[in-house]
Image: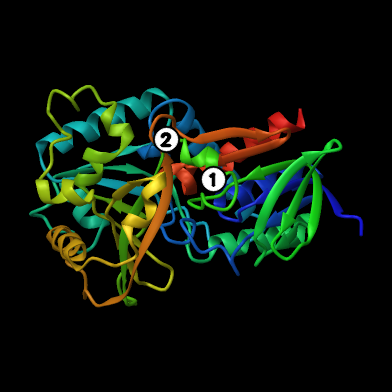
């Protein structure tokens, strides 16, 4: 039987893969999106759902973040993919963090990215329950976005199927990719065969099924995150993304501030450093608060060592710092989970030509929700041209 033919096959239906499918389908290509699981269930749905270019370094990734926001909003205008424009804020807890927020504000003003310095009093009014003993001021980015992480990708796929006739096949495990007779051939574990002009593999943290020899020699590592979510708080509103002083000391954008090194801003308490903890909040549409997170790392060849267990010691540290920052109506925890994402230690992303017309694009790290839409657009533009 002749294989169904496509212009592009994308393997992996997380944010990175699905946005590649979106940009190709939007250009009129015939696109097949394959997902090995029943539905996307890894990093794309196990995160805060924050689209915050403010945390990214100046240059390429900041621009990808800004362009991604435009793409999110353009789709949202046609189809609800849960995008909300509530902004994001970085709350400074001491003088060092205040200096860094002021310097980052200056850098963003110079490049025309809207932001606003908030006084301590401004923050206390804008964010109910914020403790005066914690907050010394804040830096607000009014245009930044949030999405519902457990729903966004499913809405996006539904939009692509409806608007652009995307072919989507979940529960489809790809076992081989081969280029021959001027086409790429994809075979699944169910022995289905598909052919296309191009294949893009966005494998997330799956490195054992396809091209394991390439990944084994790569500089990829996997980060294990730990997050939790309260029960709904119906009478309480916390708009947008809220990040604390530990995020100021961790994020790439603040590391570029002139005072970051002189003030030794990277030096934090050992208990936070051990588990890679920085504390941030986002309220979901049902009124619950998502709180996190932590970071444990393992080399690509040792990812099983991370395990799947949820560590109570990490939750205790996160909640202690969270309660130092906010006085919420309650702290009833409804669910806890681990998230995993891959990142490249030597480069900002793993982009490899595995075969003729077969590209691997993965290990985008924690930038996936913010930058994938634009990064995928640039990839498809190069293929189209």
Q: Which quadrant holds the C terminus?
A: top right
| Residue 71 placement, left or right of 310 | right
Q: Position of residue 354 (x, y in %)?
A: 64, 35
Q: CA distance from mark 2 to mark 1?
A: 13 Å
Q: Which residue is mark 1?
A: 212
Q: Which quadrant holds the N terminus?
A: bottom right
| Residue 62 placement, left or right of 294 | right
Residue depth check, mark 2 versus mark 1: number of the one nearer the observer:
1
> Quick one: which residue is furthest to the front in this view?
213
The residue that appears at 24% across and 35% down in the rendered structure is: 101
Q: Position of residue 260 (x, y in %)?
A: 19, 28
Question: Could you say which is closer to the camera, residue 99 or residue 196?
Answer: 196
Question: Could you say which is closer to the camera, residue 360 or residue 61?
Answer: 360
Position of residue 285 relative to residue 31, above or below, is below
| Residue 288 placement, left or right of 172 | left
Q: Which residue is mark 2?
A: 219
Q: Position of residue 11 (x, y in %)?
A: 65, 51
Question: Could you say which is closer to the camera, residue 255 or residue 136?
Answer: 255
């Amino acid at each position: 039987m002749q294989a169904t033919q496509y212009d592009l096959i994308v393997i992996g239906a997380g944010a990175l893969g699905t946005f590649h499918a979106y940009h190709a389908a939007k250009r009129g290509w015939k696109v097949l999106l394959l997902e090995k699981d029943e539905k996307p269930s890894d990093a794309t749905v196990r995160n805060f759902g924050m689209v915050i270019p403010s945390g990214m370094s100046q240059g390429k990734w900041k621009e990808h973040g800004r362009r991604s926001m435009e793409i999110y909003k353009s789709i949202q205008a046609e189809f609800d993919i849960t995008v909300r424009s509530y902004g994001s804020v970085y709350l400074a807890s001491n003088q060092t963090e205040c200096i860094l927020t002021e310097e980052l504000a200056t850098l963003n003003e110079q490049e025309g990215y809207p932001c606003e310095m908030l006084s301590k009093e401004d923050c206390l009014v804008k964010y109910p329950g914020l403790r005066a003993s914690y907050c010394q001021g804040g830096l607000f980015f009014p245009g930044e976005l949030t999405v519902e992480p457990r729903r966004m990708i499913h809405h996006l796929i539904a939009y692509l199927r409806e608007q652009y006739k995307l072919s989507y096949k979940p529960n489809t495990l790809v076992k081989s990719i081969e280029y021959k007779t001027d086409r790429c051939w994809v075979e699944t574990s169910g022995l289905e065969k598909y052919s296309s002009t191009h294949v893009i593999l966005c494998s997330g943290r799956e490195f054992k099924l396809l091209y394991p020899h390439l990944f084994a020699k790569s500089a990829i590592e996997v980060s294990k995150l730990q997050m939790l979510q309260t029960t709904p708080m119906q009478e309480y509103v916390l708009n947008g993304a809220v990040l604390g002083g530990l995020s100021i000391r961790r994020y790439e954008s603040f590391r570029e501030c002139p005072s970051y090194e002189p003030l030794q801003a990277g030096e934090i308490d050992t208990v936070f450093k051990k588990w890679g903890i920085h504390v941030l909040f986002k309220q979901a549409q049902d009124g619950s608060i998502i709180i996190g997170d932590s970071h444990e790392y393992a080399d690509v060849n040792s990812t099983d060592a991370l395990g799947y267990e949820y560590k109570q010691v990490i939750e205790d540290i996160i909640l202690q710092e969270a309660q130092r920052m906010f006085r919420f109506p309650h702290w009833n925890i409804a669910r806890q989970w681990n998230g995993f994402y891959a990142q490249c230690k030597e480069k900002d992303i793993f982009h490899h030509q595995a075969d003729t017309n077969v590209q691997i694009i993965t290990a985008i790290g924690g930038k996936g929700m913010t930058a994938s839409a634009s990064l995928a657009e640039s990839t498809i533009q190069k293929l189209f041209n």
